[in-house]
């Protein structure tokens, strides 16, 4: 925490990975929601204009939780590019979920 606090005043963006990096289509690690909240709190204090980007396992069913936790930049890959629907349909679902959140 102290190491992060030291550099936060100098950053424009922070990335929180919510999966183990290395390959796609992983499930969101639920305990990361609390980590996103803690990071947003520190950022509000030390770099309030910086973006909080979250990447990993985000889909229409959990995007609201990620936004409520404090993320303002969301990375989605498998939620858009998968075999359940077309990318256009998947993106529409994500947009709808975000619209309902805001």
Image (tube, helix red, strand yellow):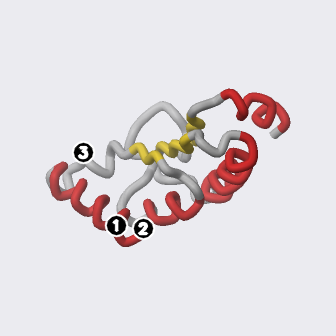
**Which residue is outermost to the bottom?**
100
Where is 98 relative to 71, above or below? below
CA gap between label 2 and label 1 equals 5 Å
Closer to the chain start, of discs 2 and 3, is 3
Badge 3 marks a residue whose secondary structure is: loop
Residue appearing at x 43%, y 47% in the figure: 74
Q: Determine whether, in the image, residue 88 is placed left or right of residue 51.
A: left
Structural crowding at the residue carrying mark 2, measured as other residues with C-alpha within 10 Å and reported as few (<14), some (14–19) or many (≥20): few
Q: Position of residue 56 (x, y in %)?
A: 47, 45
**Which residue lies under the disc numbered 1?**
99
Residue appearing at x 43%, y 34% in the figure: 23
Residue 1 found in image quarter: top right
Residue appearing at x 74%, y 29% in the figure: 7
Q: Determine whether, in the image, residue 15 is placed left or right of residue 95.
A: right
What number is the disc on residue 102? Answer: 2
Q: Position of residue 64 (x, y in %)?
A: 46, 65
**Which residue lies under the disc numbered 3?**
81
Closer to the chain start, of discs 1 and 3, is 3
């Amino acid at each position: 925490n102290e190491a992060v606090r030291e550099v936060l005043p100098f950053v424009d963006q922070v990335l929180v990975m919510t999966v183990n990096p290395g390959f796609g289509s992983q499930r969101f690690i639920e305990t990361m929601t609390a980590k996103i909240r803690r990071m947003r709190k520190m950022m509000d204090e030390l770099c309030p204009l910086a973006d909080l980007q979250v990447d990993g396992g985000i889909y229409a069913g959990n995007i609201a939780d990620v936004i409520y936790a404090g993320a303002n930049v969301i990375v989605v890959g498998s939620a858009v590019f998968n075999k359940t629907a077309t990318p256009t349909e998947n993106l529409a679902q994500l947009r709808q979920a975000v619209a309902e959140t805001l």
